[in-house]
Structure formats: C-alpha cells, structure tokens
Amino acid sequence: MAVGVVWRQWAWPAGMLRGGRALWALRGPGAGVGPRGRGGAAPGRSLRVAAPRSSDVFRELGPALSRLGQTLREQLPGPGGWDPQWSPQSCPPPEQADVVVVGGGVVGWAVAYWLKALENQQHGMRVLVVERDPTYSRASTVLSVGGIRQQFSLPENIRLSLFSAAFLRNINDYLWVPNEPPVDLQFQPSGYLFLASQRGAATLEAGVKLQRQEGAKVALLSPSQLKAKFPWINTEDVAVASYGLENEGWFDPWSLLNAFRRKAMSLGVLSCVGEAKSFITPTEDEMQLMARDRVKYVNVRLPDSPEQQPIACAIVVVAAGAWSGELLATATASLPGGSLAPLPIQPRKRYVYMWHCPDGPGLECPFLIDTSGAYFRREGIAGNFLGGMSPPEGDEPDTGDLEVDHDFFQEQVWPRLAHRVPPFQTLKVRSSWAGYYDYNTFDQNGVLGRHPQLQNVFVVGGFSGHGLQQAPAAGRAAAELLLHGRCSTMDVGRLAPGRLLHGEPLREAAIV
Ligand SMILES: Cc1cc2nc3c(=O)[nH]c(=O)nc-3n(C[C@H](O)[C@H](O)[C@H](O)COP(=O)(O)OP(=O)(O)OC[C@H]3O[C@@H](n4cnc5c(N)ncnc54)[C@H](O)[C@@H]3O)c2cc1C
C-alpha cells in the first residue's frame, strides 16, 4: 500500500518508470484499477518482485521529500507560503513565542507585520497572533465604515493618521506578497467636511491651525463658501466648516485587515485560533531569576475544548480591541499581589444605517460630520449613503448583542440629516448593522505603550472610533517601542498607558 501512496503523491509521468508498466504493478491489492481491473496484481506474484529497484528509492525518498515540501511551503514567502484558511486543526498553538499578540483584528495584525518588517535578523523573532474568532463576526475592524481623516484636535492623532495615509497610498510597497495580486483597498479619496455651530467654531478653527502645523492640508470655509461648494447643504446654523483637501476618504476595512494578515504570515508570523484566558507570572521560586511583574505564559483556550495551552513568551501585546479592558481584567485576576488598575477600554455599540436617496448629493459628496454629531458619506455611485451618530453619553445602548435600534434612526439620526440635507427627507433605509467602538472611557483616545504595572505587556487600543485608519501607524509605533524601546518615526509618547494610572486625560475633541 505504501508503494501506491508514493506513486499517487508524486504523480510522475507514467513513462518515467519503465513505460508505465510499474504504475499498476506497484499498487497493492485493491489500491486502484489497472489493466486487470481492481487489485490487478497477478495472484501469487510478489509485488516486491514486480517492482523495479528504483521504486525502493522512491519509497524512501517520498516521505522525506514530502516533509521537505511542507517545510518549504511553511517557510517561504509567496503563494503556498501561508494558508489563508484558518482552521483549528491546521494551526495548533506553539508552546512558545517571543511575542504573543492577543487579538487578530487590524491592530493586532499591523503590530505583527511591523515587528517582522522591522526585525534586524530575518526569522529572528517568533511572533504569534492569537484570535478567538476567525470569522470576525463581532470584530470592530470589519464592522467599521472605513474612513480616514487628518482632522483631529491632538497632534498625536494627526501624526498617526498622516503616517497611515502615506502607508495606504503606497500600500503595495509594504503589503504586496510576491506572486499574489496587488492589494486593492478600493480607496475612495474624499475630504471630510466638519461643520461647526457658533459654539464649536473656535475649537474647529484651533484644530485646523494645529492640523496645518502638523502638515495636513485642510481648508476653512465660511458659510457662503460652503454653500458655493456644496449647494445642497443647509448652512442656516453653520458658523464655519473645515474640509480636508488631501489624505482623506474611505476604503474597504476587510481588505486592509487581510492584506496585513497575508503579508505578516508571508514574513513568518504564526497564528492560531484560541482565546487568551489568563496570564501567568513567575512562581515564588522563579522570582530570583525573573521579575514578578512579568507575564511568563499566556494561557490560550483552544476552540471547542475545555483545554488551555500555556504559551511561554517574552512579550505580550494586548490588541483585543473593544475587549482589551475585559481581557486584562480576567487574565490578571488571579495574579499574586492583587488586581491591576482597570484598563478603561470597553465596547460601545454604534449603529450604521444605509439608505437610498437618488436626489441626494452626487459624486462630490464629502464625508460629512454635522454640528449635531450625525455623519454620513456616499456609498458607491447609485444614490446610496451610509451614516449614523453616537448616542449621548448616559444613553448608551446595551452591548450584550449587535441588534440595531431602528427607532434611533427615525427619532435621532434622520431628523438631523434631513435638516442638513433637505433631499434626505425622502430617503429610504435599505439596511443597517451595528458594531463596537473600542471605547476608551477615560479620555476617548488611543492607548499605546507598555503597561505601567506589567513590564512585558504592551497595550495598543482604545482608539474610540478611529482605530482602523490609525492601525498602520499604531502598529509601527508599537513595534518600534518593543524593538528599540522608543518610537522614532513619530512622537506619540503621550498615548502611553501611564496617563490612565496618573489620572491625566489626553482628550480628543474630534470624536465622531
Ligand atoms: C460602526 C463603526 C464605525 C467605525 N468607523 C471607523 C472609521 O471610519 N475609521 C476608523 O479609523 N475607525 C472606525 N471604527 C473603529 C475601528 O473599527 C476600530 O477602532 C478598529 O477596528 C479596532 O481594531 P482592533 O484590531 O483593535 O479591534 P477588532 O477589529 O475588534 O479586533 C480585536 C480582535 O480581538 C479578538 N479578541 C478579543 N479578545 C480576545 C481574546 N481574549 N483572545 C483572542 N482574541 C481576542 C476579537 O475576536 C477581535 O477579532 C469604527 C468602528 C465601528 C464599530
């Protein structure tokens, strides 16, 4: 039988072994159909006798070559160098990794990619991404609306988004995998248009000044300029507007996540399906060798199994999106020495509605952020739009499920939209969905850096609605911090988690 397996596996042209005669003569009984029908070896004749001598060589070589092929497929970049299908069977978690990244959303994969892209020695570092849900059914990345803008009120956020815009513009320089089709993010260039009432005018103008200082190209528009550029806008209660002239628009979030994942895996990043459940620190005995405030193992629960596998690691990156706060709380609950200060990153449910309005704004429609907080953008070119609004603080919906509240659109969002864009009075909602913001309840801003109480744990998250666009930059900043102890590409030091512990909020005014 083994001989037959070797034949099928290597599928040499029949003529290469004695005119093809050996093909059926080598098979064991019942292994296939030869000229004599099933089990065609002549009764009483030894298979070994019928086989040419070279078959022994092939029999021995076959498994060895098969193992070599498998190793090459795993190690080499390019097609065959990775398996796009995540399956628990094909990716058992390893027993150790230098860096364990918990969370395989866009942020986790961006960190993993940059770690490999920046490492000094090829294959020097074993990076593992642990993701509990390979379908991404609740991940923020795939439920987001895909926008990128430069219009923020903090220099750190402007820097992150400027870096990301350049990265997205040249994405194939970074994320193209040899012999694969180029990455296509379906990028739609379009400025964000922030509208401010008299109350918000000074903040908006200060923001634009800062954005320009940081290198962003943003125009300030008076109500009459606004009306001239976008005649369909009701400018009645608008005092001033800011409009991005470059580096803004929207793109397909799934394509970015997938591109990071494919490239990272082609560079040797490992992945496994499982849920990080707990962090283990050194025992009393080990404390002489290792500091106590270090995570030594991440315990990962395997899919459909009560088992947890400990993964020994040097560094842990918490990139679990909206669940980062929960992860740190549960994973560290049983650490000796009491619990850690809570990480204030929680899920906040946000609805997105898609509507049709053939009389609405045309191709020049920007990504509009209204004075009321409602937003919308064009979706395609057939009179479709999508948008929504964050609920007022104190009126947050339950996060237990991803059901959509349709009354919220009818009562809160639609009146605001119809006031700003009169043709929207006749819009028809076609579909909707909900997703979770990875919301930082402390100051609605990203948290990026070493955990103040766990030496080898890094947190990258809490972007509160702008993590997709900032993932390319945040991933790079995190990788630099990990590898070199400081981020040299951009100054984002103030985003370090220490501010949470010291009660020093870094508030971003332009949260949508
Ligand atoms: C409606 C909506 C609109 C948005 N619009 C925009 C936008 O226009 N522009 C923008 O920049 N951002 C936007 N965002 C925000 C953006 O989507 C997020 O900030 C970003 O996707 C966060 O990426 P992430 O990788 O941290 O999180 P996720 O994509 O949620 O990935 C985290 C992953 O961690 C996994 N995980 C969690 N816990 C564990 C564990 N214990 N073990 C293993 N795995 C775990 C989860 O399964 C998940 O897949 C929007 C978000 C929403 C909800």
Image (cartoon, rainbow, N blue to C red):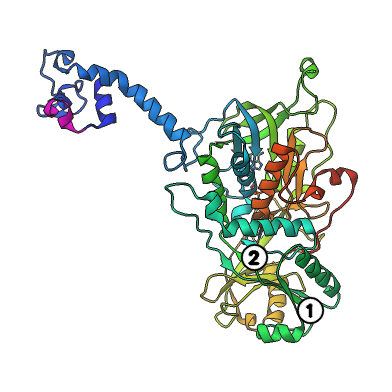
Residue 101: give x, y in percent of width and height. Answer: 65, 38
Specify start and end residues of the magenta stretch as a single range.
13-20
Disc ID at residue 368? none
Q: Position of residue 50 (x, y in %)?
A: 14, 17
* Residue placed under numbered mark 1 in the picture: 240
Relative image position of residue 251 (x, y in whole percent): 57, 62
Camera sees residue 205? yes
Q: Quadrant of residue 166?
A: bottom right
Dominant SS type (magenta): helix
Picture residue at 85% right of the left edge, 46% below the top? 500
- Say which label, 2 or 1, has the lower sequence index: 1
Image position of 232 (left or right of 13): right
Q: Name the residue carrying label 2.
A: 247
Residue at 51 percent across and 75 percent down: it is: 382
On screen, residue 359 versus residue 288, left or right, reads: left
Give the quadrant of the C terminus: bottom right
Q: Of circles 2 and 1, which is in front?
A: 2
